[in-house]
Image (cartoon, helix red, strand yellow):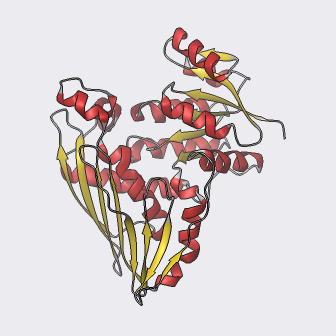
Amino acid sequence: MRSLRFGVIGTNWITESFIKAASEVEGFTLSAVYSRTEDTAKEFAEKNGAEHTFTDVEEMAASDVIDAVYIASPNSFHAEQAITLMNHGKHVICEKPIASNVKELESMIPAAKENKVLLMEAMRSTVMPNFKSIQENLHKIGPVRRYFASSCQYSSRYDKYKEGTVLNAFNPKFSNGSMMDIGIYCLYPMVVLFGKPDSVKANGLLLETGVDGEGSILLNYGDKDAVVMYSKISNSYVPSEIQGENGSILIDHIQDMSKIEIRYKDGSVEDITIKQDKPKMYYEAKEFMDLVKNGELESKVNSHQNSLAVMEIMDEARKQIGLVFPADTRN
């Protein structure tokens, strides 16, 4: 197959990270850049070697210079942009969270199916080799009784917020906040491993702008429970953990999955880490490109069903803490 020609929406650091990582996957070509302003699009395109620029998503979608698009615009734009692209036959890998809410995602999935294109959420951790190692070794710890995940990272943008400047990260208009930005890193692996929980109980601290600065969610699975903590206004240094009756799997960092070990109840320790020497976003880019090349329309790991289950959890958690986005009230 000829190279897969990509367009990108978004000209920030995460888009550059994706381009750098995807460039290491055989067959990747950056063909086009979208930005709201021509100057920004041209500057980014020149810097990253793209030939075409667009300031209109509809024009980009209708063009014949791209096969697939990586979307890294603010969360509130994901659904509309993805549907426009898919309606023109373009494959879409969409930065997490894939949408603002369940309603948006439920309009994206049929668009993918009707147009016979791949739609995948860009959740990097669940397609990393070390997550596969967790899946393959999970049986060793016996019946699982608790999943604990923590992702607490003080945001440099919070300093600006405290000074009175509200950047995108803390603006509800863009469907942002702590849960959407990093809480999802705790929830997605849980859903891939154990499915959708029976019940959800959420707590969170709402900032004056209306987004959550930090929060925690208790989830019940009947035979096990899950505890998830996340924050953009404080740091945590504890590993995440899957506790079983015979031992526990320790995950040094839920987002990066760089060191994984089993600590058995007899005191022995087994290192099940697999070397991950590629850029962090390489694995999601490869997963997506392999699926396109093989004519598959859905990832088995970052599947529509898993993305939907995670979004349902976040919708319920937001409802419980009173976190409402403008996107929730759109028709």
310 lies above or below 15: below
Q: Which quadrant is the N terminus positioned in?
A: top right
> Residue 273 or 232: which is nearer the viewer?
273
Q: Residue furthest left?
A: 208
128 lies above or below 226: above
Residue beneath the point at 32% across and 48% down: 179
Inspect this view and state whether residue 83 appears: no
> Residue 322 or 156: which is nearer the viewer?
156
Would residue 62 appear left or right of 192 to someone viewing this image?
right
Inspect this view and state whether residue 40 appears: yes
What percent of the width, then of the height, locates residue 234? 24, 47
> Residue 184 or 85: which is nearer the viewer?
184
Would residue 4 appear left or right of 302 to someone viewing this image?
right
Q: Residue furthest right?
A: 1
Residue beneath the point at 15% across and 34% down: 208
Residue beneath the point at 76% across and 42% down: 26
